[in-house]
Amino acid sequence: MNPREKITLSTLMARTRQGRKITMLTAYDYPTAQIQELAGVDCILVGDSAAQVVLGFDSTLPIKLDFMITIAAAVRRGAPSALLVGDMPYLSFNVNAEESIRNAHRFMAEAGCDCVKMEGHARIADTVRLMSAATIPVMVHMGLRPQAVHQFGGYRAQGRDARSAQRLIDDAKIMEEAGACALLLEAVPPEPAKIIAESTRLPVIGCGAGPHCDGHVVVFHDMAGLTQTALPKFVKRYGDAREQFRRAVEAYVLDITNGQYPAVEHCYQMEAGEADKLKASGSA
Ligand code: KIV
């Protein structure tokens, strides 16, 4: 039973025109997707941040396309009405056109995504154009691009000087012309983000890009308090999930150690008279 109407790219375009903010979070599994669906999150990003958040790698680079497809399909099962964005992992696109389209097709056809996300700047415009022509909607992730961490020399905010801010603004235009369905700006100061949001018809989703974007996304584990490491400056914590899970696990360990669990109410009962028969047979 799903009382909510399906969120589509047209919904996002309409929201953007109306100035109604779009909500987006990452999810990597079925139960988290169910929680987000229930809570009314508009869009769910199956981000390649799963490499760090759920697999424990120190960057997003090692994650595999097959794994991304598997978890994206699980998230779709948990959140049938959210707009689902599949994140194309490192070098799963832009190596050549055919491979990019084939890989993006898997997100759409096997996982049930509504669009894919690709990190890039003006130089991926041809890929965006080809995807778009092949009926694959593409959200372009600009600003801090974690897949380019080695080129950037670390995870650094982008567009902090006028020249690089202007480059981002120009790239946003190029992406719109190439047929992108939305933009995502990560770690960009509010000034260029505002100019981009005001100068494009596309929904602009900010991830640490100030208040003027059409919508906002952060990593679920960061905002829910599941992450152990230091959070990026732009994340606001809304929960203490790590501490709550820890307390639950400690209580479980203590109960077993003290013989408090399992109790009678956790046991299956033998059929009437069968325990006596078992005893009489001499086994007990
Ligand atoms: O992979 C991811 O989670 C992302 C967000 C940080 C925007 O790309």
Image (cartoon, rainbow, N blue to C red):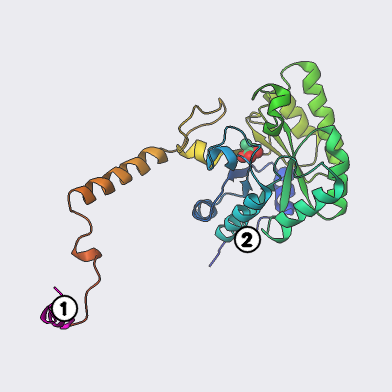
Instruction: Indicate left or right for 72 with 241 as reference.
Output: right
Please give the residue where the numbered disc 1 appears in the rendered image.
Answer: 275
Q: Is residue 276 magenta?
A: yes
Give the residue pinned by disc 2. 5
Which residue does the image show at 66% across and 52% down from the upper left? 66
Quadrant containing the C terminus in the rendered view = bottom left
Tell me: residue 171, above or below residue 139.
above
Is residue 271 left or right of 71 when viewed as pictured?
left
User: Magenta span has 215?
Assistant: no
In the rendered structure, which segment of residues is drawn in magenta? 273-284
Residue 216 visible in the displayed image: no
Q: Nearer the viewer, residue 100 or 227?
A: 100
Q: What is the three-letter code of the residue carrying label 1? A: Ala
Q: Residue at x 86, y 47 (%)?
A: 97
Q: Quadrant of ligand 1?
A: top right
Disc 2 residue type (three-letter):
Glu
> Does the rendering let one see residue 42?
yes
Query: Of circles 2 and 1, which is in front?
Result: 1
Q: x and y percent of residue 95 in the render?
A: 82, 42
Identify which residue is drawn at 64% across, 39% down: 62
